Image (cartoon, rainbow, N blue to C red):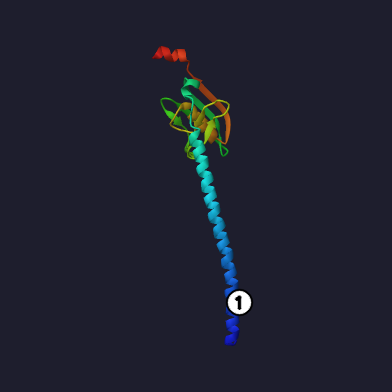
Amino acid sequence: MRLVDLYDVSRRFIGEGGGLYGGLDRLVGRSVRTRRWSTAVLRRAADLRQRRTVTAPLELRSRGLEAFTIVGEVDDVPVVARWTEADGLVCPPLLTDRAHLVVALGDTFGGSDGRPLVAASLDGHPTAVLLTVLRAFSRVVSVDISVGTDAGRAAQE
């Protein structure tokens, strides 16, 4: 191959490479714009979630929740979860991990039709714990809720 032929071949490759770099620049630009857009959407969602925190005192709506038991499945594995004021949440690690994920994702419950918005929690109000654990199940078979009366509670105090 002659030197002139090598020069022509190299110029052709450089020309094709330049086209590839141009396409790469467009893809990188699109990626940057998409990342900025998704970051803005996430920020807006977090702001909206922050504004919709619990507005009505939950205690007024669910006085006396003393214990609950939920029977169901997590990924086709039978699971029982129990919560009492004394012991807190008692359940297998499989369910605990999923419940922590529900909290980490910032799930909320209610918030429409004048109902308070309740943030997912495993150590907050008993109603929030109940709703969080229910959401963590793949399938719920039964729920048993023990509720005390306000009169009984007042007599104890």
Q: Which residue has dot 1 on it? A: 12
- Where is residue 75? Give x, y as percent: 56, 39
Q: Could you tell me if residue 98 is visible in this image?
A: no
- Where is residue 156? Give x, y as percent: 40, 14
Given residues 79 and 44, the one toward you in this image is 44
What amino acid is labelled 1 in the image?
Answer: Arg
**Image height of 151 relative to 117, above or below:** above
- Residue 73 left/right relative to 124: right
Crowd class of label 1 (few under 14; some 14 to 19; many from 20; radius 10 Å): few
Q: Quadrant of the N terminus?
A: bottom right
Given residues 101 and 57, the one toward you in this image is 57
User: Image quarter for residue 3?
Assistant: bottom right
* Residue under the image location 43 percent in, 25 percent down: 85
**Image height of 140 relative to 27, above or below:** above
Q: Quadrant of the C terminus?
A: top left
Q: Could you tell me if residue 112 is visible in this image?
A: yes
Given residues 130 and 55, the one toward you in this image is 55
* Residue under the image location 47 percent in, 27 percent down: 126
The residue most toward the bottom is: 2
| Secondary structure of residue under mark 1 | helix
The residue most toward the left is: 157
- Where is residue 21? Give x, y as percent: 56, 67
- Where is residue 95? Give x, y as percent: 50, 36
* Residue under the image location 54 percent in, 48 percent down: 38
